[in-house]
Amino acid sequence: MVALKNKIVLISGASSGIGRACAERFAAAGANLILLARNLTKLNEIAAALRSEHGVKVMVDKLDVRDRVAVGALVDNLPAEWRKIDILVNNAGLALGLEKLHEGDAEDWDVMLDTNVKGLLYLTRKVVPIMIENQTNGQVINIGSTAGIHAYAGGGVYCATKAAVKFISDGLRMDVVDQPIRVTNIQPGMVETNFSVIRFQGDQAKADSVYEGLQPLVAEDIADVVLYTAMVPPHVQICEVTVTPTHQATGGVVHRKKKE
Ligand code: 8X3
């Protein structure tokens, strides 16, 4: 396995959930981190904790990946010591609403498509050329979803964004096949983070009901898979990983324990 000490890992959406758990796992492995998210206060707190706990270097920046100009400026203005990005974790993403498509909110669609698809594209477009320039076994690790494999009712647009992540990953893998760069799409099923709370605009009871009667994954379960993916030898490419809780077979096929 490859040591991650002193590697540079850029993580989008790093202030919570899977992104934050990835930051913790990579820091524990000795990697230096560029953490990006909209919430700079949270990022600063996380960075301070990781620096003191693991002695790694952490750079933070406020970034909304939907802002193409800001993404470009951030990458273009990275100090030289931070420019040699080894691993890009495209994690920023969200689901909004669970209405029927014909009753859905077009503004929610814009946010999901702009963040999950276009934001991922903007960052990838800026970072992959650096990896090619450096020829240092770069890795792009995208956080897709089981929602990108099977659609579910009320999730049409969200599922479409995650299907896009799958096909962007597959297309990029072909485009860099002549380069020492690996591309991975990790497709988690149900992970209990703030994902459902955000989807239901802060309605905690509704969010809790998503995971009722089964043990969902936690963010660290996915971060462990991300870390493993980042540690395989340079001749190994993990193309796709699907991870679900034991009692979730596919998107909608779940077994829930009945309440006593
Ligand atoms: C999250 C998986 O099934 O909750 O991407 O949409 S699901």
Image: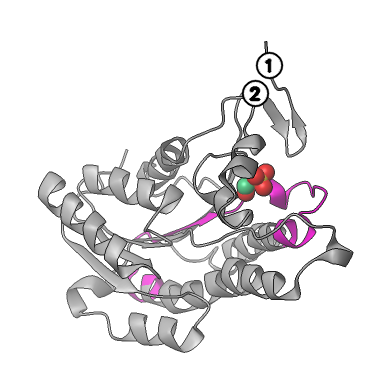
Residue bearing the label numbered 1:
259
Magenta stretch: give its range: 131-160
Q: Which label belongs to residue 200?
A: none
Q: Quadrant of residue 82?
A: bottom left
Work out which residue is located at the far right of the displayed protein and give it.
102
User: As displayed, is residue 199 above or below residue 204?
Assistant: below
User: As displayed, is residue 221 above or below residue 202?
Assistant: above
Looking at the rendered structure, the kind of residue marked 2 is Gly
Color theme of the render? one colour
- Tell me: 260 left or right of 57: right
Residue bearing the label numbered 2:
213
Please state the horizontal and vertical placement of residue 220, each as a whole percent of the image.
41, 38
User: As displayed, is residue 129 above or below residue 226?
Assistant: below
Note whether residue 210 is visible. Answer: yes
Say which residue appears at 31% left-offset and 43% top-offset.
Answer: 25
Whether tag 1 and tag 2 are in contact, CB under 8 A, the answer is yes
Toward the viewer: 118 or 173?
A: 118
Disc 2 element:
loop
Toward the viewer: 216 or 260?
A: 260
User: As displayed, is residue 220 above or below residue 156?
Assistant: above
Say which residue appears at 26% left-offset and 68% top-offset.
Answer: 60
Which quadrant, please, contains the N terminus? top left
Please state the horizontal and vertical placement of residue 3, each as a whole percent of the image.
25, 44
Mark 1: few/some/many CA within 10 Å (<14, 14-19, 20+): few
